[in-house]
Image: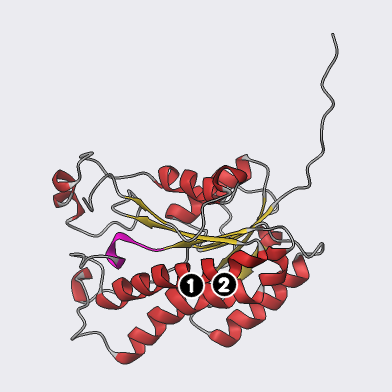
Amino acid sequence: MTTAPQTNHPRRTLLLTGASRGIGHATVKRFSAAGWRIITCSRHPFPENCPWEMGPEDHIQVDLADPKNTGHAIDEIKRRLTDGELHALVNNAAISPKAEGGKRLSSIETTLDVWQQVFQVNFFAPIMLARGLVKELAATKGSVVNVTSIAGSRVHPFAGSAYGTSKAALAALTREMAADFGPLGIRVNAIAPGEIDTAILSPGTEQIIPHIPLHRLGTTDEVAKIIYVLCTETSSYVNGAEIHINGGQHV
């Protein structure tokens, strides 16, 4: 009996922002299980309970609300990509400030400094990272996934105005990036999660469940699986799409 020869594929590398909890944490587990190297970025130091190999050595603490600090982080990421190759960038980090008692911040109540902070993290940081690492992504004909939200296409009972509009802007940016990065061989897509079961669910989320056709919340792994597909050859002709992961809540 003969054994088929094994092909040694180079290890692929993912850069993920917002990795320490929720969708980001599930994404780490999904890619790690597939053998990817994962470089993570967040405001916090590396959380010791996270499961990925080489985690502390491949974690970069960065304040994405600070453009200068984000620029320094890009330089550090480049230094860590010793072969000059990046296979996927997932822009998952986001902030959603709340009013007193966790209530939605309306467009009337949101102060200018909050608008600016939200847009810097949720909108400007993703394009800064993608532009800053464009050569490394082009070297592998890599993939960018921007995490938008159901709140980017409709007013949400819990998500504030700054968050919702930043996600709408990120969806539009995804289309622009798909047109601009596509000729370099880089695909750019977005996922728009709906109500996903995480530790930071807003009070009252249970009232939305009866209005979701599947009558349940989504899981973080269900989101991570779609992110993974968008970063692999399975989706090799998908570019400029925004995939809604919400159990039919938007229909």
Residue 148, given in percent of the width and then of the height, sits at 39, 63
The residue carrying pointer 2 sits among few (fewer than 14), some (14 to 19) or many (20 or more) residues within 10 Å by Cα, namely some
Name the colour scheme: secondary structure
Pointer 2 residue = 180
Majority secondary structure in the magenta region: helix
Q: Where are the magenta residues, as a range?
A: 148-152
Quadrant of residue 72 in the image?
A: bottom right
Mark-to-mark CA distance, 1 and 2? 6 Å
The residue sitting at the top extreme is 1
Residue 163, given in percent of the width and then of the height, sits at 32, 73
Residue 176 circle label: 1
Is 238 left or right of 109, judged from the image as shown? Answer: right
Residue 152, given in percent of the width and then of the height, sits at 31, 67
Q: Secondary structure at mark 2?
A: helix
Q: Residue at x 76, y 64 (%)?
A: 81
Is mark 1 in CB contact (under 8 Å) with mark 2? Answer: yes
Is 217 left or right of 128, judged from the image as shown? Answer: left
Quadrant of residue 13 in the image?
A: bottom right
Q: Closer to the camera, 6 or 49?
A: 6
The three-letter amino acid code for the residue at tag 2 is Asp
Q: Residue at x 22, y 69 (%)?
A: 102
The three-letter amino acid code for the residue at tag 1 is Glu
The residue carrying pointer 1 sits among few (fewer than 14), some (14 to 19) or many (20 or more) residues within 10 Å by Cα, namely some
- Is 154 colored magenta in this rendering? no
